[in-house]
C-alpha cells in the first residue's frame, strides 16, 4: 500500500512564499510594512492609554485610603477632616475629567498612525481684489 503524498505546509513555507511574491511586487511589501507599522503604533497607544487609566485608578484608591485614615483618626467633627475630604473630592473630579478626555486623546493618537502627517505648508490666503470705499 502506498503512502499518501504529504500536502501539509508549515507556516515557514507559507511565509517564504508570501515574501518571495512581495519581492516581485515591491509596492505590496511597502503596503504590508506600512500596515504592520500602523498596527504596532495603535497597539502602543492602546497600551499607554490602559496604563494611564490604571495609574489614575491607583491614585484614586491611594487617595481614598489616605482620606479614610484621616477621617477615622480625627472623626467628623474636626475641620481638617472636611478639608481632607474636599481635597479627595477635588482629585476625584480631576481624575474624572482625565477619564472623559482620555478616549478623545486615544482617538487622535491612533488616527495619527493611520493617516500619515502631511508636511505641506498651509495655502496662503490670496489678496482680496475688492477695494473698500473711501
Image (spheres, grey):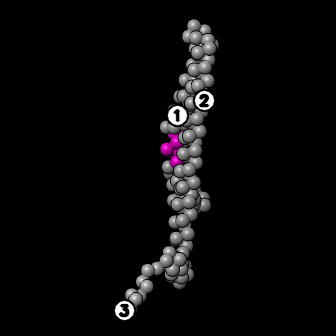
Instruction: For marks 3 and 2, give the CA distance.
Output: 73 Å
Residue 16 in sight? yes
Residue 90 is covered by the magenta coloring: no
Asked if the residues shown at circle 1 and circle 2 are in contact, with their CB atoms under 8 angstroms apart, the answer is no
In space, the residues marked 1 and 3 are separated at their CA atoms by: 74 Å
Q: How crowded is mark 3: few (under 14 residues within 10 Å), some or many (20 or more)?
A: few
Q: What stretch is highlighted in magenta?
A: 101-106
Query: Residue at the spot x=51%, y=54% of the render?
Result: 111
> Residue 44 placed where, x, y %?
57, 54
Q: Say above or below: 84 vs 27.
A: above
Q: Quadrant of the C terminus?
A: top right
Outermost residue, left side: 1
- x and y, in percent, of residue 65 in the image: 58, 25
Residue tagged by mark 3? 1
Kindly identify which residue carries mark 2: 62
Q: Can you name the residue that lies furthest to the bottom here?
A: 1
Residue bearing the label numbered 1: 97
Indicate which disc, 1 or 2, sits on the residue closer to the N terminus: 2
Tag 1 secondary structure: helix
Q: Residues within 10 Å of mark 1 (few under 14, many from 20)?
A: few
User: Can see residue 133?
Assistant: no
Q: How many discs mark residues in the rendered view? A: 3
SS label for mark 2: helix
Q: Kindly state the secondary structure of the residue where label 3 is placed.
A: loop
Amino acid at each position: 500500500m502506498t503512502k499518501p503524498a504529504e500536502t501539509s505546509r508549515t507556516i515557514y513555507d507559507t511565509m517564504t512564499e508570501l515574501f518571495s511574491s512581495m519581492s516581485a511586487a515591491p509596492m505590496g511589501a511597502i503596503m504590508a510594512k506600512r500596515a504592520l507599522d500602523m498596527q504596532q503604533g495603535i497597539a502602543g497607544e492602546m497600551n499607554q492609554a490602559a496604563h494611564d487609566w490604571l495609574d489614575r485608578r491607583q491614585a484614586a484608591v491611594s487617595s481614598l485610603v489616605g482620606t479614610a485614615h484621616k477621617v477615622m483618626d480625627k472623626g467628623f467633627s474636626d475641620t481638617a477632616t472636611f478639608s481632607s475630604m474636599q481635597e479627595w473630592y477635588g482629585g476625584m473630579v480631576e481624575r474624572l475629567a482625565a477619564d472623559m478626555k482620555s478616549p478623545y486623546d486615544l482617538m487622535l493618537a491612533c488616527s495619527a498612525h493611520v493617516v500619515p502627517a502631511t508636511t505641506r505648508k498651509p495655502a496662503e490666503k490670496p489678496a482680496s481684489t475688492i477695494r473698500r470705499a473711501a
